[in-house]
Every structure is written in structure tokens, then in C-alpha cells.
Image (cartoon, rainbow, N blue to C red):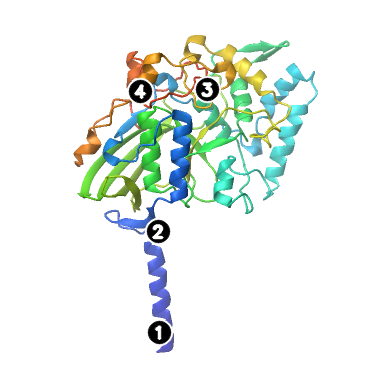
Amino acid sequence: MHASVVSLLLVSASLAQLRNTPQYQNYGYPSGNYGTIRKDELEQQQQAFKQWWGDELVTKFTDLPGEGKVPEYRVPYAGHDYPDRAGGTIFALSKYDQAFHRGRQLATDHERMDVSAHRGGRSDGPPRMGLFGRMRGGGGGGHVPTWYGHCNGWTAAAIRHAEPQKSVVRNGVTFTPADIKGLLAEVYMYADSEFLGGIDPAINPGVLHLTLANWLGRGSYPVGMETAVGEVVINFPVFNYKTTINKLSDRQRDVRTWITYTLNINREMDKSPPNYHRQMYFHYVLDLDETETVRGGRYYGDSQQIDMLWVPRQPVQGGEEGNKRGNPHLSVKEVLAIWRESVPEDLRKKWLNIDPTEEDRVLPPVEAVAVAEKPAEAAATDSAAAAAPAATAAEAAASGEATSPPAAAPGAEGSGESTGSGSSGTTVTP
């Protein structure tokens, strides 16, 4: 009798635990993950948006755009993630050493040492993207994962820079577009980024919705996405999202969200393949308060989940504050100068970035600063039909109109043409 009771209790406990996993959950009912947005996480998002856009983070559900995308020229290029097992960015750095260190392998040896340490499985590696490690580790005192590639470096570079278009010569050494992309990935490898949510094991669906709607929907600004929930770190740049909304009650909305992101390629190319994109699907319930402010949410069992969202800040010289673990033998100013020479000036001057470098700080048109975006009407309808597109800055840019959603646009940093298109929203599997 006693053994039977114990067995029954163990089975019940196991089933209860299993039902809380996405694999088991009935897709028609939301799980317990994750509930109310943490106060400190929401405050972090509000401060970040205010700092970089000069505007308040919109949290009222009916004022949030139902979809958003970047201008076509701003779609991030597909780049290599430079895995440690293949030597990281050593090939591009060897060219840099030839041009700027008279062949002494200073930058190359630093990279070789770095990737060798990671292959050895050290647990005292670099924190996850600066602020990420601090947010997750409670001040950096706990275990932090090691890096096994440069996916974050490529993601940051593809968000902040247009794909290099032509070769550039320095001190008799020719840097191809592929070389320049490798240098950019190295520059951003350990540079600080702005954390946009993901304190929980998977990002709270309320934070996910608010971040996409404010940064991509209102700002037409791409964001970095860390997809792997857990120790593994895999980053991609997101440039498009779209939602459909169904009203469950006065305080709950059923939301289906599709995001489109750029994939990495297995080797660096002078020109990345066009439309090398993929989609992710999220299905969640959003909880609202009496003012229709988003307070949190829970995922359905059929939903995918991700770790966190972020945006890159301007690169800082390796070894200095903001990039302590970066390569000290690689000049950020020199790399950015090479990149500028490789892309058209007219496109560089309309490529808006938060936290721009002084060399690339270009103010947007006066009209862009003065015009605020209208909220999407689709979110207010609360119907099961697809939410109507908001009048985004991306659409304005595509039509030639000078419009910027937030009250104050960030500074601008150079650009060039991109090969992808942010308008299709379709899945392209490589």
C-alpha cells in the first residue's frame, strides 16, 4: 500500500512537471510561463528607450503597432558567425596585421589565444554581451557561458552597418568586402550592447511584445535576438514582425506574432545571398490592466521561445571600458574608416543608429524629428483578423517621406545597400 502511494505521488509529480513544458502543453491553453513582467526589467526597457529615442516606451496595448519592419536598404546582411573551431576571425586579422603592424601577428595572436581558451571549455570566459551578464548573473558573480563563435559580432555589425560593397586598399593590402565584414564582427565581439529584455529563462511574452512594437514597430529599428534558451548562445538580427490579435476578455488578448530574421552563412562572402531569411512564430496571451497597459503574459504550448532581445551600441576600442575583452590590437577607428570607404556615402548618411560614432553622426531631417507615429488601428479592433499595418517609419522611408516615429530620432551612422527585402515577410529556408 505504501509503495503504491509513493509511486502514485511520483507519477503525479512527474506529470505535473511535464505539463509545464512546452512540448506537453495543449496549444489551446497558455502555460504558466511567465506571468507579470518584473518591475526592474520594465524599468530597464523604459530607461533605454527614453535614453536613445527621447520618447516614452509605449505600454498601452491599443497604442502599439500591429506590425513593423525596417526600410529595404536597412535589412541586415547574412554574414558568417566565425566559429572558434575554424579560428574565428584570424584570416581577416592576418590581413590587418600585414597592413598596420608590418606583418607582426599582434591582432591575429590575440584572436588565436581567445578562441583557444574557449575551445578548452573555460568557464571564466567573457560575460554575455556586457549588460546581459550583469542582468543574468546578479552583478557578474555567478557562472557565465563561454563564446564559441562571433554570432553576436556579426549580428551587431549587420544591424549597425550596411554590407561592404567594394574592396579597400590600405598600405598595399587589399581588404575585400568579406575581409571587412570579418573585421567588423571582431570589433563588436565583446562590445557593450543595450539589453532589451530577457531576465527570465525565456523572455517574458509581454516584454517580447513591447520591445518589438516599440523598436521595430514605432522606430523601424532592427534588434538582436538570442534564440537559444539556456547556456547555448545563438544570435540573429530581426528586421520584421507581424501580429494577429483576438480579444479573449477585457483584460486578455490572444496574440500570434511572426518575426523575420537574417540567417548566418557557413563562410564569409563578398556579397551575401539575398533573402536569406527565416521566421519564428510566437503564440501568447497578454495580460492587461484596467488602462489596457501590458502587464505580462503566458506562452501557449505551440509557441516558440527565445532567450533575449538587444541592440548594439557604438564600438569601443578593445581593452577599454565598454569593450574590456576586445582585441586591443585592432583599431576601431581604422576598421570603421575602411568600412566607410567600401559603401556609398548617400546611404551612409541616412542610416540611423542609436549611440552613433562622432565620425558618422548625421542628424535626420527636421521633419523627421517633429513627426510622431500614429498608433496602429488594428490593435484597437481586437479582432481575430490580421492586425492592420501601422504607419511606420520604414514605410515612410521607402516612399521617400521624412518621417520618424519616436519624438526624437537617434543619431545616424553610415550605410550602404543591402541585398535583402524587409517587405515580404515570407519564410526563405536556405
* Left or right: 287 in relation to 113: left
- Relative side of 393 to 322, left or right: left
Q: Residues within 10 Å of mark 3 (few under 14, many from 20)?
A: many
- Between 331 and 80, the residue placed more toward the observer is 331
> Which residue does the numbered mark 2 point to in the structure image?
21
Q: Mark 4 and 3 residues: CB-CB less than 8 Å, in contact?
A: no
Which residue, given by chain and number where applicable, does mark 4 sit on?
Answer: 393
- Element under label 4? helix
Whichever of callouts 4 and 1 sits on the residue coming sooner in the sequence is: 1
The amino acid on which the numbered mark 4 sits, given as a three-letter code, is Ala
* 224 vs 356, nearest the viewer: 356
Callouts 2 and 4 close, C-beta under 8 Å: no
State which mark lies toward you, 2 or 3: 3
Q: Residue at x 27, y 45 (%)?
A: 292
* Image-quadrant location for residue 9: bottom left
- Judged by depth in the image, the label closer to the viewer, 2 or 1, is 2
State left or right for residue 132 relative to residue 66. Answer: right
Using the numbered discs, state the Cα–Cα distance from disc 2 to disc 1 in whole angstroms. 26 Å
- Label located before the other in sequence (2 or 1): 1
Q: CA distance from mark 4 to mark 3?
A: 19 Å
Q: Which residue sits furthest bottom?
A: 1
> The C terminus lies in which quarter of the figure?
top left
Question: Looking at the image, is mark 1 or mark 3 earlier in the sequence?
Answer: 1
- Residue highlighted by disc 3: 161
The reply to whether residue 99 is visible in this rendering is yes
The quarter in which the N terminus is drawn is bottom left
Give the residue pinned by disc 1. Answer: 4
